[in-house]
């Protein structure tokens, strides 16, 4: 059983982003989204660690985040945090799809 280090790192980035949004701007919504989607991503990484083809939870979390943060990036044009999370989420989606076909 090999740990999905990339998946856990992605989950940690989501947790950290939610915390930073709360700490800097006082955004409770950022904190809640970070906890929910970070938790889903961590659970998905745990599932992938046990079965490499069990990507459903991780794919859902990364897909939703890529759409939501991509929309926020398009509206604001700000690279931080929306643009970075969009890129990370899209990379995660592509990685998960690759895991599915490989």
Image: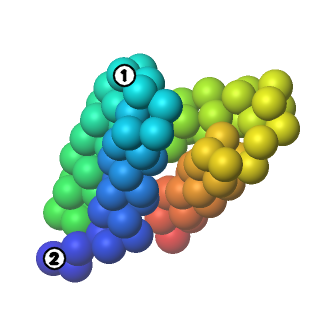
> Residue 16 at what x, y percent from top left?
37, 51
Report the side of 28 relative to 59 (left or right).
Answer: left
- The one of 22 and 60 positioned closer to us in this rendering: 22
- Label disc, if present, on residue 28 of the rendered structure: 1
Callout 1–callout 2 Cβ contact below 8 Å: no
Residue 102 visible within the image: yes
- The one of 35 and 8 positioned closer to us in this rendering: 35
Picture quadrant of residue 94: bottom right
Estimate how packed mark 1 is, as few (under 14), some (14 to 19) or many (20 or more) residues with alpha carbons within 10 Å. Answer: some
> Residue 37 at what x, y percent from top left?
36, 36
Residue at 64% over, 34% down = 69
Estimate how packed mark 2 is, as few (under 14), some (14 to 19) or many (20 or more) residues with alpha carbons within 10 Å. Answer: few
When the figure is inspected, residue 100 is found, relative to residue 26, above or below; the finding is: below
When the figure is inspected, residue 2 is found, relative to residue 13, above or below; the finding is: below
Picture quadrant of residue 49: bottom left
> Residue 45 at what x, y percent from top left?
29, 57
Q: Which residue is mark 2?
A: 1
Label 2 residue SS: loop
């Amino acid at each position: 059983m090999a740990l999905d280090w990339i998946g856990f790192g992605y989950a940690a980035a989501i947790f950290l982003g939610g915390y930073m949004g709360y700490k800097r701007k006082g955004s409770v919504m950022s904190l809640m989204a970070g906890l929910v989607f970070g938790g889903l991503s961590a659970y998905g990484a745990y599932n992938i660690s046990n079965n490499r083809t069990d990507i459903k939870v991780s794919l859902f979390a990364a897909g939703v985040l890529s759409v939501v943060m991509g929309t926020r990036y398009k509206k604001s044009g700000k690279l931080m945090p929306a643009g970075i999370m969009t890129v990370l989420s899209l990379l995660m989606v592509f990685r998960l799809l690759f895991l599915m076909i490989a």
